[in-house]
Image (cartoon, rainbow, N blue to C red):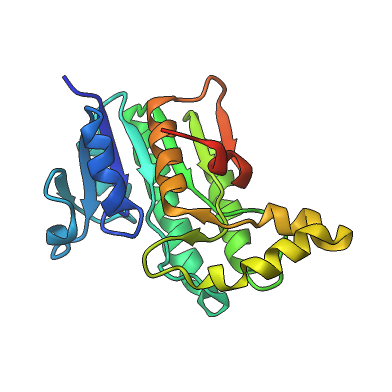
């Protein structure tokens, strides 16, 4: 029997690209989605139509030993979406952790965000840190992946500022923070997610910081 992967956020920017990659490596993928959105999932996976904020509605779709990938969150996060971060991100993580724990999942993979303090995205970082705390307090083995901004189709505009980023990396006062918030490419994120799925952590929690994401090859 193929190994099982369960994913939330499968219709999103990362999810719809990750699902075929995981299936190509021999995994069977179930993707949680709300009714009416199942047609947005890659056809190669099995849709689980359920409520991502209520663990009891999808726990029965999780097999013991499943790898759970949590990608669901507010799309296009920005400073004005503080309330949504808690309503969507934190609530869905709490439900996912509860269901994964009850079902005896092998491994929980979570895409968080870089935790180097910034004023612009402070609320988003705080919310994701709270999500990480919820996961860490569970009995689940966990991989946490912390990008800052992912460069890919529809998200290339930060490349215009690469010369400025390079300059800031050379200035002692800004070097460390700029490096801690480096851009990562879509392929690097997908490679990291695939690597995490195929290589569960030896310890309870493993964190992929930006430099780790930039080094991984699936």
The x and y percentages for residue 141 are: 48, 28
- Residue 137 visible in the shown view: no
Residue lying at 53% horizontally and 41% vertically, measured from the top left: 144
The x and y percentages for residue 70 are: 39, 47
Residue lying at 37% horizontally and 42% vertically, measured from the top left: 69
Residue lying at 53% horizontally and 53% vertically, measured from the top left: 184
Which residue is at the front of the view, 213 or 200? 213
198, above or below 110, in the image: above
- Residue 195 visible in the shown view: yes
Q: Is residue 108 left or right of residue 50?
A: right
Which residue is at the front of the view, 168 or 50? 168
176, above or below 145, in the image: below
**Quarter that holds the C terminus:** top left
Q: Is residue 87 left or right of residue 35?
A: right
Which residue is at the front of the view, 202 or 196? 196
**Quarter that holds the N terminus:** top left
Give the tally of numbered discs.
0
Residue lying at 48% horizontally and 57% vertically, measured from the top left: 90
View extreme (front): residue: 163
View extreme (bottom): residue: 80
Q: Quadrant of residue 200?
A: top left
Q: Is residue 145 left or right of residue 8?
A: right
144, above or below 83, in the image: above
Q: Quadrant of residue 127?
A: bottom right
Which residue is at the front of the view, 159 or 58? 159
């Amino acid at each position: 029997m193929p190994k099982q992967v369960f994913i939330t956020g499968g219709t999103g920017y990362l999810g719809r690209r990750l699902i075929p990659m995981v299936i190509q490596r021999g995994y069977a993928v179930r993707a949680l989605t709300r009714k009416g959105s199942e047609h947005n999932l890659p056809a190669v996976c099995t849709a689980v139509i359920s409520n991502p904020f209520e663990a009891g509605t999808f726990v029965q779709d999780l097999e013991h030993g499943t790898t759970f990938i949590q990608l669901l969150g507010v799309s296009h996060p920005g400073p004005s979406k503080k309330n949504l971060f808690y309503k969507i991100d934190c609530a869905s993580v709490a439900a996912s952790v509860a269901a994964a724990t009850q079902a005896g999942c092998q491994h929980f993979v979570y895409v968080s965000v870089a935790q180097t303090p910034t004023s612009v995205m402070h609320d988003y970082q705080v919310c994701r840190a709270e999500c990480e705390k919820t996961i860490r307090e569970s009995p689940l083995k966990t991989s946490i992946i912390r990008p800052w901004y992912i460069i890919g189709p529809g998200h290339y505009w930060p490349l215009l500022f690469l010369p400025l980023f390079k300059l800031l990396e050379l200035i002692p006062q800004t070097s460390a923070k700029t490096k801690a918030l480096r851009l990562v490419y879509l392929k690097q994120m997908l490679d990291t997610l695939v690597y995490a799925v195929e290589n569960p952590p030896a310890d309870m929690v493993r964190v992929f910081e930006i430099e780790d994401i930039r080094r991984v090859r699936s």
